[in-house]
């Protein structure tokens, strides 16, 4: 196989002092989705994950659990495997730092760096962060121990003889590498942080300890143990054969990694220490680091003390693995901290998945079945609305792939849902249920265009929801063969396919959201006062509530609330409407959405822009929700 067709993606190895949580799941879902996308393209993929099993904290956790360290790490490592399997995360290898193959690779690197003169023995006097297992270069202030710059916790004084790695000699080489590889870290803000860290001055790094027992013995001096971060970082190389003479060819094929994925608190180790270690061994550096933010819950960082740590197991049992994966990638931008909420998850399942995509497939198949049409032959001619949907499909493919160059799945999926919404709008605007008897050829054209669009959506969404999208392919009669490179096998650029429709169980079930006691109380109070707020029928008749589709959306500069919407009201024309929904929606989330607007509201100036109507929004604890018809209707339809 040609090396250019390989793709090697990794998660960090997870520390076994605790089991999987929503943060480690998020990282691994990103990796799994990237791996599947590359398989879709026909690449040979290696997806690595695993567990980090050495160090002082692990020994302490094992002691607290009343277990020997090896038995303890075995149990936690197995817990990770079980959860990843629950979510159908298809990793190639699961590396453990207690594996013998890993130990061999660590020894090889130490031997290589020692021969190069990059490792020497000296006394370390300084500060150490036990939770992060990292040496801290900050100095004491007013006689007090410095806080760890990574986690903010108190450090302890350390004085011991250690082996050191000459990190300082790689400072200029690292800065040169960052300059020549400006896309090394995504997002770019993280690269700037790393450059500032390296420019501030690198000191030689202590890479052994004498006060830790549960770790890899230092070769040639077993009174010392290998520093846990040296041990941990080497996993990316040892998993693909580094240190094993019989796997040299395999290592040369896979290395370097195409992308390492991690949360932002460990970027320093991966962006400075790890490249320096590789430079010392004369090995190529990884091509990319993808660094995501933290997941908060209801605006707060997850912690055991707050009791807000989200357990992936009950989550998958309640909502299903693929809906959870979709929500994590759709809602949480990798470029910043992002909030997880159960209400948000349920909203996306109900609106995006069940109400948007699932409902569209159901309507297509049911309408064809009702009219005795199972096979939709390829079409020779397309009307203007169908050609416009085709152009939208092609634009979606291009923009989707552009977003994935930076691994911005939240933007890619946002763009994909514009196509979902516009396909729904197309289907309803053409009113195929009226065409079935009067214009049968036109009827078939509308169903064919909708099926082609659904095929595009399914292929782009497959890396996120493989099992569900394969069901969608089955319903369309589309042959999906990943082994041959499905993207090449399904030519999205050509709308010349024949579809054989099959009715299947509903792809997504709507979540029944119970009314809370607080909502019931509010409804009761509203009922009590309804007589005081009644209006007559003439007042109601004056308000024009009209259905429109959002064609475009922009941020209003100098406003943290407003978005400017261009709304299509069908035969009534188009209007610009400002809406205070920026805290809930990105502009890209709105394209193609139908909603209810007050059409005859007197225009008014807002932040220098004229607003020609009002968007109706329902707000609750979960955020803002569109008021929209259950089924898409023609733009310009007035509510009665």
Image (cartoon, rainbow, N blue to C red):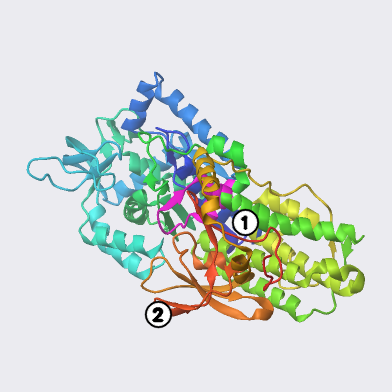
Q: Which residues are magenta?
A: 324-346
The residue under label 1 is 352
Q: Earlier in the sequence, mark 1 or mark 2?
A: 1
Q: Is residue 177 above or below residue 298?
A: below
Question: Which is more toward the observer, 4 or 553?
Answer: 553
Location of residue 426 by image quarter? bottom right
- Direction from residue 604 to residue 143 in the image, left or right: left
Residue located at (18% from left, 35% from top): 160
Which element carries disc 1, helix, strand or loop? Answer: helix
Residue located at (36% from left, 70% from top): 180
Q: Is residue 515 above or below residue 3?
A: above
- Direction from residue 398 to residue 230 in the image, left or right: left
Number of the label disc, if any, that sits on residue 510: none
Could you tell me residue 65's position as x and y percent?
40, 21
Q: In which quadrant will I find the C terminus?
A: bottom right
Number of the label disc, if any, that sits on residue 608: 2
Location of residue 18 by image quarter? top left
Q: CA distance from mark 1 to mark 2?
A: 33 Å
């Amino acid at each position: 196989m040609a090396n250019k067709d390989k793709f090697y993606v990794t998660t960090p190895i997870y520390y076994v002092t605790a089991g999987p949580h929503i943060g480690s799941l998020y990282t691994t879902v990103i990796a799994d989705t990237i791996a599947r996308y590359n398989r879709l393209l026909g690449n040979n993929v290696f997806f690595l994950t695993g567990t980090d099993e050495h160090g002082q904290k692990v020994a302490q956790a094992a002691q607290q659990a009343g277990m020997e360290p090896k038995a303890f790490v075995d149990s936690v490592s197995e817990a990770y495997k079980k959860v990843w399997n629950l979510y159908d995360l298809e990793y190639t290898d699961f590396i453990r730092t207690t594996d013998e193959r890993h130990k061999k690779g660590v020894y090889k690197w130490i031997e290589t760096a020692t021969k190069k003169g990059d490792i020497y023995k000296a006394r370390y006097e300084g500060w150490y962060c036990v939770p992060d297992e990292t040496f801290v270069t900050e100095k004491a202030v007013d006689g007090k121990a410095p806080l760890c710059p990574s986690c903010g916790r108190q450090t302890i004084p350390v004085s011991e003889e250690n082996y050191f790695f000459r990190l300082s000699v790689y400072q200029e080489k690292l800065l040169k590498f960052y300059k020549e590889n400006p896309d090394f870290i995504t997002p770019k803000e993280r690269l700037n942080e790393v450059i500032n860290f390296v420019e501030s001055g690198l000191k030689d790094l202590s890479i052994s300890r004498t006060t830790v027992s549960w770790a890899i013995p230092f070769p040639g001096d077993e009174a010392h143990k290998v520093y846990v971060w040296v041990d941990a970082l080497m996993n990316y190389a040892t998993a693909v054969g580094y240190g094993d003479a019989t796997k040299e060819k395999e290592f040369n094929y896979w290395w370097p990694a195409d992308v390492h994925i991690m949360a932002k608190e460990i970027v320093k180790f991966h962006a400075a220490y790890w490249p320096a270690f590789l430079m010392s061994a004369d090995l190529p550096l990884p091509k990319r680091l993808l660094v995501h933010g933290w997941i908060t819950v209801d605006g707060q960082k997850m912690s055991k003390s707050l009791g807000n740590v989200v357990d992936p197991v009950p989550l998958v049992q309640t909502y299903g693995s693929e809906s959870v994966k979709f929500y994590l990638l759709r809602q949480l931008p990798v470029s910043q901290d992002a909030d997880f909420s159960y209400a948000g998850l349920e909203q996306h399942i109900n609106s995006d998945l069940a109400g948007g995509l699932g409902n569209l497939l159901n309507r297509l198949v049911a309408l064809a079945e009702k009219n005795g049409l199972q096979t939709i032959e390829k079409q020779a001619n397309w009307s203007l609305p169908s050609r416009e949907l085709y152009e939208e499909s092609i634009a979606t493919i291009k923009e989707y792939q552009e977003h994935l160059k930076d691994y911005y799945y939240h933007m890619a999926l946002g763009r994909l849902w514009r196509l979902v919404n516009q396909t729904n709008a197309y289907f309803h605007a053409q009113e195929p249920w009226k065409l079935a008897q009067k214009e049968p050829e036109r009827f078939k054209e509308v169903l064919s265009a909708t099926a082609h669009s659904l095929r595009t959506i399914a292929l782009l969404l497959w890396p996120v929801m493989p099992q569900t999208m394969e069901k969608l392919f089955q319903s369309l009669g589309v042959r999906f063969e990943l082994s041959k490179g499905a993207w090449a096998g399904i030519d999205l650029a050509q709308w010349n396919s024949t579809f054989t429709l099959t009715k299947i169980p509903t792809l997504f079930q709507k979540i029944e959201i119970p009314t809370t006691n607080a909502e019931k109380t509010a409804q009761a109070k509203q009922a009590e006062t309804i007589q005081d707020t009644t209006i007559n029928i003439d007042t109601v008749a004056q308000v024009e509530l009209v259905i429109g589709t959002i064609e475009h959306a922009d941020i209003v500069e100098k406003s943290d609330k407003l978005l400017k919407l261009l709304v299509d009201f069908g035969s009534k024309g188009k209007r610009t409407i400002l809406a205070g929904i920026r805290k809930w929606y990105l502009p890209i989330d709105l394209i193609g959405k139908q909603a209810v607007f007050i059409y005859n509201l007197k225009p008014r100036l807002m932040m220098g822009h004229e607003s020609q109507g009002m968007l109706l929004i329902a707000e609750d604890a979960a955020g803002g929700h569109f008021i929209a018809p259950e089924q898409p209707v023609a733009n310009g339809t007035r509510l009665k």
